[in-house]
């Protein structure tokens, strides 16, 4: 049985943030992720997780940049100090929130020097928090122009170079389809590196149903491959969140 979790940054947006935890539980989810859980009282959020018996699956590093500047510095040459400071701040939140994974964002950069910077920073982070699950995620450059990590071959090289047991691939089927044109084939080639999966329909990034990605087949493939991590709904509901949850059944 797949473990589905709800991305509360995208789902249940009809509700105030703190009410989304109970709504997710009532809708049948056993886990949630929040991309940037930084601007709410951390203990209140922890209480919601415990009260509703929810696993906290994932959060992002770094904190959102309130000045509208770049999001993520892990692959930005010259941004090492900023990356380390941000990572340590994320770890302080993580001590309370206890996420299974922290997704480390690469930021906007390009070229071999950026890749070398990414590897160095990830090695540092993996050693700094050896018991914390960490992920990196290829994100398509149409949605995030200039984002460094925008293909699976680079992700594979970086993961091999870092070679740390607590760093793995975050496989977002929506991005995979936009990057490669075939999410299922990308999973076939790279899914063995994944410890976290996110899903959304293509091309609209609504519910994972009825678009270009055959999700019933994709979920069956994950199960056949022995994937036992979480599958997160990270999409913009086409109508209301609850009305759109038929895909889980
Ligand atoms: O954009 C995505 O897809 C993500 O998973 C986010 O973590 C990026 O903010
Ligand atoms: Mg994603």
Image (cartoon, helix red, strand yellow):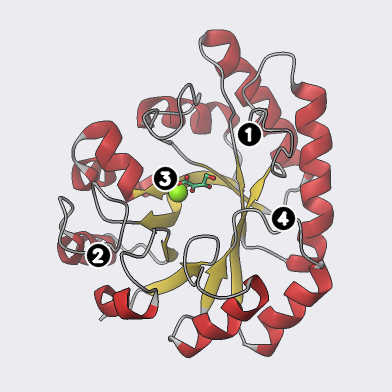
x and y percent of residue 19 in the render? 62, 80
Q: Which mark is residue 219?
A: 2
Q: Are marks 4 and 3 in contact (CB under 8 Å)?
A: no
Residue annotated with mark 1: 71
Could you tell me residue 65's position as x and y percent? 71, 37
Q: Quadrant of the C terminus?
A: bottom left
- Asked if the residue at label 1 sits under 8 Å from ligand 1, the reply is yes
Q: Quadrant of residue 232?
A: bottom left
Identify the mark nearer the N-term, 3 or 2: 3
Q: Write the residue at 72% across / 44% down.
A: 63
Report, in whole angstroms, how far the alpha carbon at label 4 lies from the one at label 1: 25 Å
Residue 54 seen in this snapshot: no
**Residue hosting label 4:** 131
Q: Residues within 10 Å of mark 4 (few under 14, many from 20)?
A: few
The CA span between labels 3 and 2 is 17 Å
Looking at marks 2 and 4 on the same chain, the residue that comes earlier in the sequence is marked by 4
> In this image, 212 relative to 39: left or right?
left
Residue 98, image x, y percentages: 72, 66
For numbered disc 2, what is the local secondary structure? helix
Disc 1 vs disc 3: which is toward the camera? 1
Q: Residue at x 36, y 65 (%)?
A: 237
Q: Secondary structure at mark 4?
A: loop
Residue that badge 3 annotates: 193
Of helix, strand and loop, which one carries label 1?
loop
């Amino acid at each position: 049985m797949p473990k589905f979790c709800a991305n509360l940054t995208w789902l249940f947006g009809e509700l105030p943030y703190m009410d989304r935890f109970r709504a997710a539980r009532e809708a049948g989810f056993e886990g949630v992720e929040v991309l940037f859980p930084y601007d709410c009282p951390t203990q209140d959020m922890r209480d919601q997780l415990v009260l509703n018996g929810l696993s906290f699956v994932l959060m992002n590093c770094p904190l959102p940049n309130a000045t509208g500047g770049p999001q993520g510095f892990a692959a930005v040459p010259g941004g090492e100090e900023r990356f380390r400071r941000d990572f340590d701040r994320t770890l302080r939140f993580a001590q309370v929130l206890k996420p299974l994974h922290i997704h480390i964002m690469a930021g906007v950069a390009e070229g071999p020097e950026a890749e070398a910077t990414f590897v160095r920073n990830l090695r540092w982070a993996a050693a700094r928090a050896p018991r914390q699950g960490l992920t990196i995620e290829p994100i398509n450059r149409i949605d995030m122009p200039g984002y460094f990590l925008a293909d699976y071959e680079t992700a594979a090289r970086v993961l091999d170079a870092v070679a740390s047991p607590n760093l793995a691939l975050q496989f977002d089927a929506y991005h995979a389809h936009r990057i490669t044109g075939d999410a299922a084939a990308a999973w076939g080639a790279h899914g063995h590196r994944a410890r976290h999966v996110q899903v959304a329909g293509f091309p609209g990034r609504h519910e994972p149903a009825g678009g270009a990605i055959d999700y019933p087949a994709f979920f069956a493939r994950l199960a056949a491959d022995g994937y036992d991590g979480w599958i997160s709904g990270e999409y913009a509901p086409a109508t209301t969140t609850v009305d759109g949850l038929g895909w889980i059944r």
